[in-house]
Image: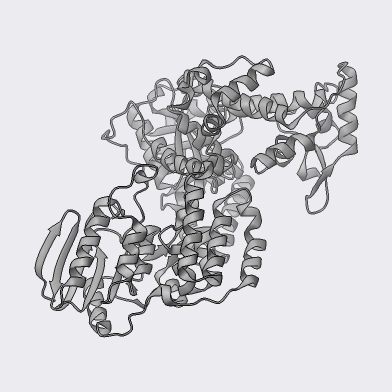
Amino acid sequence: MTSQSIEQSGPIRVERDGDILQITSDSPPVNALGAAVRDGLEAAVKAGVADSSITAIVLRCDGRTFFAGADISEFGKPLQGIPLPTLVDLIEASPKPVIAAIHGTALGGGCEVALGCHYRVAVPSAKLGTPEVKLGLLPGAGGTQRLPRLVGVKAALEMIVLGNPVSAKAAADMGLVDKVVGEDTLAADALAFAREVAGTRPIPRVRDRVVAPDPAAVETFRKTHGRKLRGFDAPEACITCVVAAAERPFEDGLAVEREQFMALMNGNQSAAQRHLFFAERKAAKIDDIDPATALRAIGRVGVIGAGTMGGGIAMNFLSAGVPVTIVEMQQEALDRGTGVMRRNYEASAAKGRLPADAPDKAMALLSPTLSLDDLADCDLIIEAVYEDMSVKKDIFTKLDAIAKPGAILASNTSYLNIDEIAAVTKRPGDVLGMHFFSPANVMKLLEVVRGRQTAPDVLSTVMALAKKIRKVAVVAGVCDGFIGNRMLMPRQVEANKLLMEGATPEQIDRVHVAFGMPMGPFQMADLAGVDIGWHRDPSRIENIRDALAAEGRWGQKKGAGFYDYDEKRNPTPSQRVAEIIDEFRAKEGATPRDISDEEIVARTLYTMVNEGALILEEGMAQRASDVDVVWVYGYGWPVYRGGPMFWAQSEGADKVVAGLERYGFPVAKGLKTGEAFK
């Protein structure tokens, strides 16, 4: 291959190879389709079309990936440069074949650019996808119209509405990619392919293809994914556009796409989802620590406790290729815990989520033991026993004597004081909290609790390690319940008060589910176990929950809690629970009244926002968006509402303040001043 006439204009490089024009984008880190890239592509394509000696054009990217999507930092700002839909149309209208040479990921706008090309070749490791739905949007540069015409309605629904990428092989099988080429010979293979198709007439344009309507596929898709997509606007808009692609001419379908895209772009849901996209990335930053701080090496991790939580924590590291030493007190508990871990891995492999050899590879990195002394060579030790301060202090006293100098000591506590735990060691700077959420091998959130004396490099190391084990980490300060559980407390307190005043468990839960929560507070209590934290003294019945626990109504595991459950754990309102609530009302002289849904929202959700504002005032969270990340990734706050602080701001701070004051709550200063939203 001999390249000639190399020209560079900003991020776009143009070079000739005989009669083939190569247009290459070099815009690190991911060749996002920002204004400079789009304008450069426009100029290069026009030049290739105008040059009579050029017979075909190859479009590819330098660096680690093909165009990985639009530049979302441009969203909501005045448009600069050629619009992406216009650029895609320009490429497609070329009278000379344009070949997309894909490596890395062709996502979103990158996939739409590829769809505008006349042919697509890709290396085996490449992935293609349209993930815009995850930002509350849809592919707005013709993607909803071109993709169905190329791969059919069923495959297009899977890609566009769910937003998950497909491999190069899968893309080739469905007709999205014309040829899978050599992993290390993309440039040469793309040029060779370009020469093969240079004289093809007519040039195949996706817009000219026709796709048959498939109402059965649409109906099946809705039934299969309806529950998962409940409450989201973007998936329904995507479905509307895909149906339009099959039922309408191309230009009419584009008009539908544009209408739907603009409605989503200007809506609250996309704003919320874009907020979370950036919030997740901000959460990884520690405001007062130099990003260049040297990290401690983590070669082996120790986990104390092989129960549900300890085993799940260990799996995170094993899956990331980090050796783990796991400790239990009894052989039976150790065997049971490691057995559960293996079965979890095998179940994932059986479902195709992991390679067949993944369970053996992961478990080979695990060293089970009954001796704390075997943690001496670990670089990070995570204690994951039950929530008892005296037990945790005893463990950390022993670890202080066993762990090597420089080892990081972490507690998985969900609300206990990290400073108090650190104080029993001679190395408080090496101690912090790592609050995983159950099931720890599935849930994405990790609250990293910074003690008063936690060393900067310790905090930075754990935050970086969180990314390695695919967690979304948020820094929290030391306070009762940290960020998430502290905000949960007022919700639970008010929900219990509302029961006494006249609401029912099902009404309170219904309001929360309608809001978008996966379940309400009483459904959650039944799932977790009504007996959790119960003093187990039947003679001390202090509240409704005590009464339920004393009668053996421990939740789903017993078939009865705040609800009655059938054999499939489907809940129904309980007459016995209604009687218990009435008994407590009579005992306290409470006269039940009608309670509105609006009051439930104000007293259970506004109070959470208020607590979040207090957390920020006290410096227990770095920024409001961190609070949102905690509640979305750890507690099921609906993604399309952006987290409690974003939601409160979009609702209007004045409305939230008025609601709190209406029911007699002292309002955090930050809610009144707007500081709570920064």
Determine which quarter of the picture holds residue 219.
Answer: bottom right
Q: Is residue 521 left or right of residue 38?
A: right
Identified at 47% across, 41% down, the residue is 276
Q: What percent of the width, then of the height, locates residue 291?
A: 29, 34
Q: Residue furthest left?
A: 5
Residue 621 placed where, x, y %?
A: 46, 26
Q: Which one is nearer the viewer's eye here, 73 or 527?
A: 73
Q: Picture coordinates of residue 665 (x, y %)? A: 65, 16
User: Is 563 rendered above or below residue 150?
Assistant: above
Q: Is residue 356 above or below residue 590?
A: below
Question: Considering only vertical position in the picture, is 425 above or below 146?
Answer: above
Image position of 344 (left or right of 373): right
**Quadrant location of the N terminus?**
bottom left
Q: Is residue 5 visible?
A: yes
Above or below, 407 against 148 in this view is: above
Decide if residue 533 is on the left or right side of residue 145.
Answer: right
Q: How is the image coloured?
A: one colour
Q: Which quarter of the image is occupied by the C terminus?
A: top left
In-image side of 154 versus 83 (left or right):
right
How far across and down, in percent of the image, does residue 284 sit? 39, 37
Of 420 and 508, which appears nearest the observer?
Answer: 508
The residue that appears at 90% across and 24% down in the rendered structure is 583
- Which residue appears at 25% of the width and 79% of the height? 194
Q: Quadrant of residue 518?
A: top right
